[in-house]
Image (cartoon, rainbow, N blue to C red):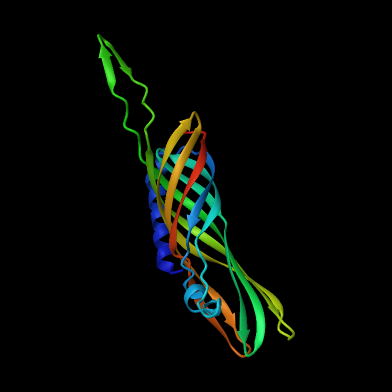
Amino acid sequence: MSKKYIASAIVVLAGFMGSYSAQAQVNLKSISVGASYWQPSLDYWNDRSFLTAYNNGSGAKFSGQVIPTAAIEIGIAKNLSVGGRVGYYKSSASSSLVIGGITRTEDFSISIIPVALDLKYTFAQAPAPATTTGTTTTQEKPKDAFLTPYIGVSVARYFINNELNRVVVANPGTLSEKQSGNSYGVQVFVGAEKKLVKMLYAALDVRYHLGSYNQLTRTETTSTTEKVSLNGVEAGLSLRLKFNN
């Protein structure tokens, strides 16, 4: 992940928090659970790795997946909040291969846990008009907005696990290998929420992931490092229990 993206996100976070520090009112704003569809690029695996030999040379690709998500939101000032969000992506590819007359079956899977620290700005609802009767002025109770939009930026950490299982028929070479690591990235997002009943809201969230990680690849004689992109759009729905609007 390029350092300039992380630096830019930190500057934005600091700027927002500095602007609102004088009117900060920390409170638990909401908790939510949901599901999103995320398709990270994973360009190395999909375009250049050994997976391209799968399925009789036609190749195999990791596809987008529906991932579960959970989040918590803390209000820090009017219309401004911070939050934590986590998801879980897993995809796999498998095939039988014949190499040098030796038949083997391989299954390769990858799992990614994106953990994000969100900074979110929720657009304010217009105040209700005031009415005056004689010498008395009353403020009408604001009506619930049909949709309440928001925008935000996140600093994210991605926890990655790979697993390769290989079965070789009547020859040595059967193995099970796991690798794990993590990397930082940035997310930008937009969304909107709608009140369903009392404290329960439905939310649509669309975010773009900007990130990558370095993958160690080995052969019998050499090892190299490949950059794997995590860039991609994630879109999903969630149910949000709001404690403070």
Place of residue 8 in the rendered image (x, y in percent of width and height, measured from the top left): 39, 61
Place of residue 169 in the rendered image (x, y in percent of width and height, measured from the top left): 72, 82
Which residue is more in the foreground, 107 or 245? 107
Place of residue 5 in the rendered image (x, y in percent of width and height, measured from the top left): 41, 64
Is residue 14 positioned above or below 2 on the image? above
Q: Is residue 166 left or right of residue 127?
A: right
Where does the C terminus fall, quadrant-wise? Answer: top left
Q: Is residue 191 left or right of residue 56?
A: left
Task: Find residue 9 and report its image quarter.
Answer: bottom left
Which residue is more in the foreground, 139 or 58? 58
Which residue is more in the foreground, 14 or 55? 55
- Which residue: 66% across, 87% down? 102
- Which residue: 50% across, 59% down? 156
Q: How many marks?
A: 0
Place of residue 168 in the rendered image (x, y in percent of width and height, measured from the top left): 70, 81
- Which residue: 37% across, 26% down? 143
Q: Is residue 28 visible?
A: no
Q: Is residue 83 visible?
A: yes
Which residue is more in the foreground, 174 or 117? 174
